[in-house]
Image (tube, rainbow, N blue to C red):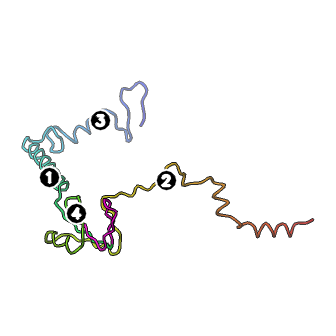
Amino acid sequence: MAINPGADSIEHGNGVTNEQLKLMRASMNPPNHPASLEGRPKRTRKLSTFLAALLVAIFMTGQLTAQSPASVTLVKAGRLLDPRTGNVLSPAAVLIESGKIKEVGAPSRVQADAPAGVKTIDLGSATLLPGLIDSHTHLLVDPIGPAEVEWARHYNGAFLPGLLLAIVESPS
């Protein structure tokens, strides 16, 4: 790009001036050209607006159905700790409907009450704690110790053979 002193136009590469560049850009998209928004017929704009609204409606209904599933799940396990009584039930099953515990008991009884086609998850000999959340924590305990302690623990005795060799071989 070169600026000619005393001239009102800026020259872009290959001798093209600023005015010529503006004319070239204007000729690429005239007002009635299909690529320009002003020249589009109203019918096309209405169609694109309708399609956009239709897409929004489709995504909204998909989101609403995903939020309210009426799914039923049967979870079987080797043991279950009842948080109310403290008793252990073995073997055990939990019927979960719409994300909430509906029934807890022996697998044969709970499965008899479950609807046909229920999704079953068998956890083998695992222990279930329905309604309990593992809140075990150590507040104010820093899991990362000081660097010196970590070095000492990691390299405890690792340098000892080299140190002894250096002492033995050092001149007196």
- Which residue corresponds to mark 2? 138
| Disc 4 secondary structure class | strand
CA separation in Å, label 4 and label 3? 73 Å
* Magenta span contains residue 87: yes
CA separation in Å, label 2 and label 1? 44 Å
Residue 133's place in the image compared with 110, above or below, is above
In terms of image quadrants, where is residue 85? bottom left
Upstream in sequence: badge 2 or badge 4: 4
Upstream in sequence: badge 2 or badge 3: 3
Instruction: Determine crowd level at label 2: few under 14, some 14-19, many 20+ residues with C-alpha closer than 10 A.
Output: few
**Quadrant, the C terminus:** bottom right
Q: Nearer the viewer, mark 1 or mark 4?
A: 4
In the displayed structure image, the side of residue 42 where residue 1 appears, left or right: right
In terms of image quadrants, where is residue 40? top left
The one nearer the camera, 9 or 156, is: 156
**Quadrant, the N terminus:** top left
| Circle on res. 61 | 1
Residue 92's place in the image compared with 26, above or below, is below
Q: What residue do we see at 24% from left, 72% from top?
A: 106
Upstream in sequence: badge 2 or badge 1: 1
- Which residue corresponds to mark 4? 96
Q: Nearer the viewer, mark 4 or mark 3?
A: 4
CA separation in Å, label 1 and label 4? 25 Å
Three-letter code, disc 4? Ile
Q: At which x and y percent is residue 3?
A: 42, 31
Three-letter code, disc 3? Gln
| Circle on res. 20 | 3
In the displayed structure image, the side of residue 40 where residue 93 appears, left or right: right
Instruction: Determine crowd level at label 1: few under 14, some 14-19, many 20+ residues with C-alpha closer than 10 A.
Output: few
Q: At which x and y percent is residue 170?
A: 87, 66
Part of the protein shown in magenta: 79-95
| Disc 2 secondary structure class | loop
